[in-house]
Amino acid sequence: MAYRITSGCVQCNVCIPGCESNAISQGSDQNTIDPALCVNCGVCAANCPFEAIVFEEESVAVGSQD
Ligand code: SF4
Ligand code: SF4
């Protein structure tokens, strides 16, 4: 499970100072979260005025059920 920044990001950068893990960086089109640094605190998702940060369930492995 992880937080991810979607294409709704307008790079207002409100989320960056709120992330105590410094996991958010500026990309060319939108900001990105480094999953290796993110501690899933959810602060960024709460702070984003554009609701561009979503929490995603980890994808379930396919092909294991038959
Ligand atoms: S607060 Fe939201 S819209 Fe602003 S830079 Fe962060 S993810 Fe993008
Ligand atoms: S969930 Fe927390 S640690 Fe992860 S990017 Fe957002 S503010 Fe940073």
Image (cartoon, helix red, strand yellow):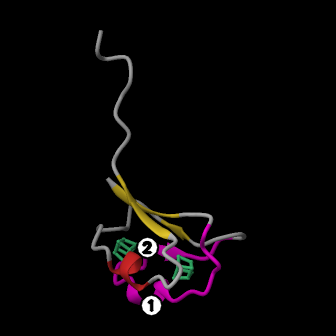
Task: Report if residue 40 lies within the magenta region.
Answer: no
Residue that extends furthest to the front in the rendered view of this protein? 50
Quadrant hosting residue 21: bottom left
Above or below residue 21? Residue 38 is above
Left/right placement of residue 26 relative to residue 2 reads right
Above or below residue 62? Residue 30 is below
Mark 2 sits near ligand 2, with its Cβ under 8 Å away: yes
Q: Is 26 or 14 nearer to us in this picture?
A: 14
Task: Report if residue 20 lies within the magenta region.
Answer: yes
Magenta-colored segment: predominant secondary structure = loop
Query: Whole-Å distance between the Cαs marked 2 and 1?
Result: 10 Å
Left/right placement of residue 38 relative to residue 29 reads left
Q: Where is residue 59 in the image (x, y as percent from the top left)?
A: 38, 39
Q: Where is residue 43 in the image (x, y as percent from the top left)?
A: 33, 80
Question: Residue shown at 65%/79% (left/top)?
Answer: 10
Look at mark 1 in the image and give the residue it sits on: 17
Amino acid on which the number 1 mark rests in the picture: Pro
Q: Which mark is residue 23?
A: 2
Left/right placement of residue 19 relative to residue 6 reads left
Question: Residue shown at 59%/73% (left/top)?
Answer: 31
Q: Where is residue 26 in the image (x, y as percent from the top left)?
A: 61, 76
Q: Which stretch is magenta?
A: 8-27
Amino acid on which the number 2 mark rests in the picture: Ala
Residue that extends furthest to the right in the rendered view of this protein? 28
Q: Where is residue 35 in the image (x, y as percent from the top left)?
A: 41, 60
Q: How many marks?
A: 2
